[in-house]
Every structure is written in structure tokens, then in C-alpha cells.
Image: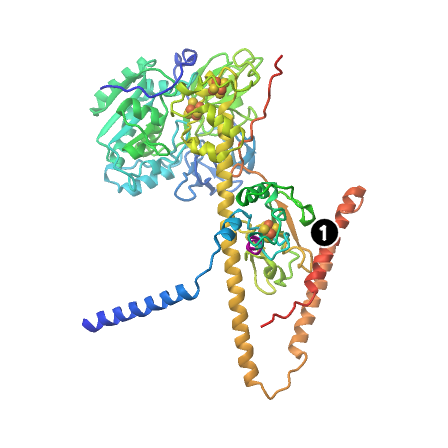
């Protein structure tokens, strides 16, 4: 098989040997598990348990909410102690809705039902994939059920198993392939069945010879037709578009996905999780995580989702001088807000930092237009131009220069002699554009609703006029009473309700406006004055319309 | 069989005629300039600009009757975009019409609501649910934060709550720009 070279890329120091030499450490059950509802791309999962409920290992605790969503399960047996905001691993540092489970140590499984996938309708099988919580474990955590649906796009001819693992420090896929290759390939079989792909290729970087050998042996044992390719080690060779180029020679069009050229890419970890789910009825409740960096015993662990990162550090031997944790690798990862955040489905690596391993970034200097960032960009972009536009907040021009083709790999910042955090600028620009699009959508709905209201009021006015005209016709003789007893009664009712409500308000809402500093009181007085004025205006009789 | 076909064809022709007539009769005479200005305005429909909604203000700008800096929800950013569209110099927001505030939504304290329906009548986007003498509530996702429902409430049970940033609405911040002193 002939390999192609994708454009750009860099060779950062690997740092993989530290954690790759030890076998995967079996899962341990921590006292407390914290499970965020938003661990995948799309709609957050919806909790289906209450505080106080006892749950079994593998029991659904939150269900998928809509098409782009997946379910979430209890990683061990225990009691739900809290459903509320808690700290999560996210670059924002903002808390999110989580279910907290106090484990009982029994680790007691709920019923597990393997699925006879060969005799299951594809749509139903994808439903199982979603309800078993499977999302991409390579880092993007996109719901796998959607990626396994070939409808609506060009037919998928090739399924790629991504064992690239190009980020420095991370070795979880390497160990998984070495130790559990058969399950990975079983999962690939199910994926191939769902996608109808003729060709199956596994791409593994050539710095992992043991993994390549293990995958070859497993393929032989299972009698599976698969091409296993040793790819040159270049960062970011494990990117979806990059591995597609390397293995098939196909270029993904700008603004498109690999499926546009008939290729679907799955991480080996996802394939493994899928096999466990379908063949053994085990939902996604654990994953392999590399714990490395500034720890005594860098190693891969099988970790229950929801395990606090600080406990993992203890298991791997926490060292003095730990300055923080990066989730993911040094190129694409981010600092977690505190050490107690839980491991989530996207956590492939917990990288402990120290001043020596990760010295503070040198200060940013102005761009000298050296264009060193251009040849390393795997998306064939012009990073210095993108930076220029993003910095000037010229979002339109940034988009013209294909900002959204940027995969945020960080190659450009890696080589930049001015130490500019280029990717931060691109992320800022992207999220600003998304926010503006959302605002625009909201404004459009508001406009529609306002126009509909104007239309409705016009219609009601007309209908009322017609009704009145008809009434006037029929009641011509009768003199109109100024106020009917009926209306009087109604007025009285309103008056009473008002008095009641005011009494109630005085009771339930004690004034918090006493003892305020004079500036606050002035502000309140001003607001009250404005309110009074508006009420005044509202009371004025409306000018009768001229016809 | 033939009658059935004829009847169906007849209905189709009649409906087509009605639709065609409606299209002519109710054709919206859209002024492209008004449309483009309206597309920039935030559609809060709050009336702070002195016009009964965003579209009337857009119309006034297009006619050259109103200045471009009267819309507080649109803020400086909105003024800048309008200036760009109209090819004029941007100017600071006219603060006599109000200041730009963080986006808020109205909140009805439901145990106080007497169900008078006055707020429903004030809401420009029909974002309040409720019937006479029933408790009312705001559809937060549709509320534009215009504050028009606050004043009419006879029991003062509506307050404006600023929207909190959460993971769904969070944005990457503009990188803090640090330059090393050279020389
Ligand atoms: S981060 Fe974006 S611009 Fe920079 S090298 Fe990677 S793809 Fe290119
Ligand atoms: S590498 Fe850095 S300094 Fe050189 S052109 Fe790119 S952004 Fe500018
Ligand atoms: S001030 Fe209010 S009504 Fe006027 S344009 Fe701005 S949002 Fe629309």
C-alpha cells in the first residue's frame, strides 16, 4: 500500500516512552464519581435519576436528548447524592450540570444484554449505540451513532481505524492496541457493517511497532480483511483529514468532511468501546487514560468516567512542585480549572505540569512576517494572515481566508519565533463568529414574532370592529348604559385582587432597599422616576386614529 | 373517474387563482435599504430609539429622518455597522435614549402575579404566556429583554434578570495582548 504525505506538520519531542512501557492499570473505584451531562458534542444528556436513588453499575442515569446526543451511565454502583452545578474540565473554568454518585464499593453490575448486531435493523443498532453512550474517544466526542449513519451523504467506501496518536506524551491508544486489539477489530467489524464500507484500513504511526504487530496478529486470528499501515510519525498525522490523505491519497475539500470523499474515520478507542457495548452490553463507563508528565509512575489506567483527576494523580504518584494539569496533550490540550475535575469521555491524557517540564510561555512579540508558520500548516492556510485578521477582529476577512478549515493543531504557534499564541486568536475568532450567527438567528425570530404580532393585532382590531358594528345594528334602539352591573362587578374583583396581591407582596418581599449607600438609593430613585413616567405615558388616552 | 379529475383540476385552478391574487394584493413593497438597516438592528423592539419598533426606526433612518446612534441595545457595534452600511462617520451612542446593558430576560414572580394580562399586551414578541386571572410566565428563549412589560405590571412582579454565561454560551476570549518592551 502506497502512503501519501499530507502537507505541513512538525516533529515535537515525543515523550511517549515514559508511559508506554507499563501495562494498563486496572480500574479502581473512587469514593465519589462526578458525571457532567455535557461530555459529548450536541445536546447535553437529560438526567433520569433523582437524588437518593440507588444505581447499579451500567445503569442509565441520563438519556440522550435528541438526535445529536448520547446517554450517560453509572460507572459503578452507589447512591446519587447530588444533581447540580459542579466544576468540569473545560477551558472556560465554568461549572456545569453534573450527577454525583457516592459509590458503595460493591461495583455491582446492572443486567447486561449483548446485541445480536448481524440480525438487528441498522437504525435500531444505531439507537443502541447512542443509548449505550458511545461518542468519539479520540478527543472530539462526537456521537458515534450519527457518524455510523451513511444516509444523506456520498457512499462510504473506506473505514479508517485511527491509531495515529500523534500528540506528544499520550500513549493510551498504543497500549489499548497492544493489549486489546481483538476487541478493537470486533468493533471495526460492526462499524464496517453499518457503513457498508468495502475497505478497512488501520493507520498506526511507525513509532508504535508493538501495536502494529498486535493488530496484525489479532486480524489474522479473527480472519478479518484489514490493511494495517505503518505511517511516518509526523504531528498531526492522526487528524481525520490528515490520516485520510496519508492512507487513501484523497483530499478533503475546504469546508468539508472526510465523508465528502467517502471516508469515515474512527479512533481505535471508540471502536473498542463499541465492541464492549454491542457484544457485551457494557455501556461506555470507563476509558483508558494516560497519566504522565510530572508524576512518579507515568502509566495508562483504565479509569471510570467521573473519577476526580486528583485521585488519578495519587495513584500515579503525585510529586512536589505540581503546578497544574493539562487535559490532553501539550499541543491541543488545555489547563483544567482545578485538580478535582472528573475524567470525562474526552479525557485521553492527564498531564501533570511542573515548572521544569512546562516553563511559562515566553512573552508574545510582534509578528515579523517571517512566514515560518505557512509551510507547517496541515490545512494549507496562511496562519499569519489569519492572525492578522483575528487580531484586528476582522472576522469577515478571516473567514475568507478559510478560518474554519483550521484544525487548531498548533503547528503554527509551535514554530512561531515570536511565540504568538496563534491558536488562541483563531479560537476567539471562531467562537465570536458562532456567537454572532446565533444572535442573528435570535434577532430573526424576534423580527418574525413581532411582525406576526402586528398582523394579529390588526386582525383582532378588524374583527372587533365588525363585531361592534353588528352589535350596534341589533341594539340600535337601546340606549347604551354607561357601565353595566357586570362591568362594575369585574372592576371590583380586580380591585380586590390588587389589594390582596399588594398585601401578599408586602409580606413575602421585605424591602431590601433600606440601608443602602446614597449612590444606590439615587439610582433606585431614578429608576422609580422613569417607571412613573412610563406609567404616566401609558395612562394618557391614545389619540383616536384618523380615517 | 373523469368527474373526479375535473373536480380536482377545478379546485387546483381556483386555489391557484386565489394564491396568485393574494400574492399581488398583499405584496410587501420592501425597500431594500430599509431591509438592510433592519437586518443590522437588534430586533429587541424596545422603542428606546423613540420609534415603535426596529423597523419603523430603520424606515426613519432610510428616509434620513433619524440619526444612526439612537439604539442602545445595538450599542456602539451597531452604530459602527450602520455607519459602514450608509457610508457615514460612526459616532458615539446618544445616551439620552439609554445605555447599552448586558442582555437580560424578564422574570415574573409567579406567586405575585394577579393575571391581569397587561404584560401580555405590552410584549412586542408575544413571549408571555397566560390567560386572564391565570398566572403568567415568560418564554425566556423568545424574550428580547426589551423591558416593556416591567412598567405596566400593577403589582411590580416582573424583574429583568441578566443572562448568566454558561458552557453553552461561553466564548473564547480575545487573547490578552502582551508585548515585550523592546529596546
Ligand atoms: S492551528 Fe490552524 S492555522 Fe495553525 S497550523 Fe494548525 S491548522 Fe494551520
Ligand atoms: S511564524 Fe509567527 S512571526 Fe512568523 S509569520 Fe507566522 S505568526 Fe508571524
Ligand atoms: S432602540 Fe429598541 S426598538 Fe429601537 S431599533 Fe434599537 S432595539 Fe429596535
Specify whether A99 is left or right of A212: right
- Which residue is drawn at the image coordinates 41% and 44% (left, top)? A66
Give the percent coordinates (x, y) of residue A521: 78, 46
Seen from the viewer's position, the closer of residues B123 and B134 is B123
Asked whether residue A32 appears in the rendered view, the answer is no
Asked if A446 appears above or below A459 in the picture, the reply is above
Give the percent coordinates (x, y) of residue A510: 75, 50
In the rendered image, the residue lying farthest to the left is B1
Q: Quadrant of residue B112?
A: bottom right
Asked if A256 appears above or below A22 in the picture, the reply is below
The N terminus of chain A - image quarter? top left
The C terminus of chain A - image quarter? bottom right
Please provide the residue range marked out in magenta: B54-59
Q: Tell me the residue that label 1 is attached to.
A: A509
Q: Is residue A457 magenta?
A: no
Q: Residues within 10 Å of mark 1 (few under 14, many from 20)?
A: few
Seen from the viewer's position, the closer of residues A441 and A15 is A441
Give the percent coordinates (x, y) of residue A485: 67, 79
The chain letter under disc 1 is A
Seen from the viewer's position, the closer of residues A346 and A521 is A521
Q: Main secondary structure of the magenta part?
A: helix
- Which residue is drawn at the image coordinates 59% and 65% (left, top)? B132
Seen from the viewer's position, the closer of residues A250 and A14 is A250
Q: Quadrant of residue A150?
A: top left
Asked whether residue A188 appears in the rendered view, the answer is yes
Specify whether B124 is left or right of A242: right
Amino acid at each position: 500500500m502506497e502512503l501519501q504525505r499530507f502537507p505541513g506538520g512538525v516533529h515535537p519531542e515525543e515523550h511517549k516512552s515514559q508511559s508506554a512501557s507499563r501495562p494498563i492499570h486496572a480500574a479502581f473505584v473512587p469514593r465519589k464519581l462526578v458525571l457532567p451531562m455535557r461530555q459529548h458534542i450536541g445536546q447535553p444528556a437529560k438526567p433520569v435519576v433523582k437524588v437518593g436513588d440507588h444505581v447499579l453499575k451500567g445503569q442509565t442515569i441520563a438519556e440522550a436528548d435528541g438526535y445529536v446526543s448520547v446517554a450517560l451511565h453509572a460507572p459503578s454502583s452507589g447512591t446519587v447524592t447530588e444533581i447540580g452545578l459542579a466544576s468540569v474540565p473545560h477551558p472556560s473554568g465554568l461549572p456545569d450540570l453534573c450527577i454525583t454518585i457516592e459509590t458503595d464499593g460493591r461495583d455491582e453490575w446492572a443486567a447486561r444484554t449483548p446485541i445480536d448486531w448481524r440480525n438487528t435493523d441498522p437504525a435500531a443498532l444505531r439507537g443502541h449505540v447512542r443509548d449505550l453512550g458511545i461518542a468519539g474517544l479520540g478527543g472530539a466526542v462526537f456521537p458515534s451513532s450519527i457518524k455510523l449513519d451513511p444516509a444523506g451523504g456520498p457512499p462510504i467506501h473506506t473505514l479508517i481505524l485511527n491509531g495515529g496518536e500523534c500528540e506528544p506524551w499520550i500513549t493510551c491508544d498504543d497500549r489499548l492496541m497492544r493489549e486489546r486489539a481483538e476487541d478493537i477489530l470486533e468493533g471495526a467489524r460492526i462499524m464496517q457493517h453499518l457503513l457498508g464500507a468495502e475497505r478497512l484500513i488501520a493507520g498506526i504511526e511507525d513509532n508504535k511497532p508493538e501495536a502494529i504487530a498486535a493488530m496484525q496478529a489479532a486480524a489474522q486470528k479473527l480472519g478479518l480483511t484489514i490493511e494495517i499501515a505503518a505511517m511516518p510519525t509526523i504531528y498531526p498525522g492522526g487528524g481525520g483529514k490528515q490520516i485520510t490523505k496519508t492512507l487513501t491519497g484523497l483530499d478533503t475539500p475546504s469546508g468539508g468532511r472526510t465523508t465528502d470523499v467517502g471516508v469515515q474515520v474512527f479512533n481505535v478507542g471508540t471502536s473498542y468501546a463499541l465492541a464492549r457495548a454491542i457484544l457485551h452490553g457494557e455501556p461506555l463507563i470507563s476509558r483508558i487514560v494516560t497519566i504522565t508528565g510530572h508524576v512518579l509512575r507515568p502509566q495508562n489506567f483504565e479509569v471510570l468516567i467521573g473519577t476526580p483527576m486528583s485521585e488519578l494523580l495519587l495513584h500515579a504518584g503525585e510529586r512536589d512542585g505540581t503546578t497544574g494539569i493539562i487535559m490532553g496533550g501539550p499541543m491541543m490540550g488545555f489547563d483544567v480549572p482545578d485538580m478535582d475535575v472528573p475524567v470525562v469521555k474526552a479525557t485521553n491524557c492527564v498531564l501533570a505540569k511542573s515548572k521544569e517540564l512546562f516553563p511559562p510561555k515566553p512573552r508574545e512579540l510582534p509578528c515579523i512576517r517571517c512566514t515560518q508558520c505557512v509551510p507547517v500548516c496541515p490545512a494549507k492556510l496562511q496562519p499569519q494572515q489569519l492572525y492578522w485578521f483575528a487580531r484586528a477582529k476582522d472576522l469577515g476577512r478571516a473567514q475568507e481566508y478559510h478560518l474554519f478549515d483550521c484544525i487548531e493543531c498548533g503547528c503554527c504557534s509551535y514554530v512561531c519565533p515570536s511565540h504568538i499564541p496563534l491558536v488562541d486568536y483563531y479560537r476567539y475568532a471562531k467562537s465570536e463568529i458562532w456567537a454572532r450567527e446565533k444572535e442573528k438567528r435570535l434577532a430573526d425570530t424576534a423580527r418574525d414574532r413581532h411582525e406576526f404580532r402586528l398582523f394579529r393585532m390588526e386582525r383582532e382590531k378588524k374583527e372587533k370592529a365588525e363585531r361592534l358594528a353588528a352589535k350596534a345594528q341589533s341594539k340600535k334602539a337601546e340606549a347604551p348604559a354607561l357601565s353595566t352591573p357586570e362591568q362594575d362587578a369585574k372592576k371590583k374583583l380586580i380591585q380586590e385582587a390588587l389589594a390582596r396581591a399588594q398585601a401578599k407582596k408586602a409580606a413575602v418581599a421585605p424591602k431590601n432597599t433600606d440601608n443602602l449607600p446614597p449612590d444606590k438609593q439615587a439610582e433606585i430613585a431614578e429608576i422609580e422616576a422613569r417607571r412613573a413616567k412610563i406609567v404616566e405615558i401609558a395612562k394618557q388616552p391614545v389619540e383616536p386614529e384618523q380615517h | 373517474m373523469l368527474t373526479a379529475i375535473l373536480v380536482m383540476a377545478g379546485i387546483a385552478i381556483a386555489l391557484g387563482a386565489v394564491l396568485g391574487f393574494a400574492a399581488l394584493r398583499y405584496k410587501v413593497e420592501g425597500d431594500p435599504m430599509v431591509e438592510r438597516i433592519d437586518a443590522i438592528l437588534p430586533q429587541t423592539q424596545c422603542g428606546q430609539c423613540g420609534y415603535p419598533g426596529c423597523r419603523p426606526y430603520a424606515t426613519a433612518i432610510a428616509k434620513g429622518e433619524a440619526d444612526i446612534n439612537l439604539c442602545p441595545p445595538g450599542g456602539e457595534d451597531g452604530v459602527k455597522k450602520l455607519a459602514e452600511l450608509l457610508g457615514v462617520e460612526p459616532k458615539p451612542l446618544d445616551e439620552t435614549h439609554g445605555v447599552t446593558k448586558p442582555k437580560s430576560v424578564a422574570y415574573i414572580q409567579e406567586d405575585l402575579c394577579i393575571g391581569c394580562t397587561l404584560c401580555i399586551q405590552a410584549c412586542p414578541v408575544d413571549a408571555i404566556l397566560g390567560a386572564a386571572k391565570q398566572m403568567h410566565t415568560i418564554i425566556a428563549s423568545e424574550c428580547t429583554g426589551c423591558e416593556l412589560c416591567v412598567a405596566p405590571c400593577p403589582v411590580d412582579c416582573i424583574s429583568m434578570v441578566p443572562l448568566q454565561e454558561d458552557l453553552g454560551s461561553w466564548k473564547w476570549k480575545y487573547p490578552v495582548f502582551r508585548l515585550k518592551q523592546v529596546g
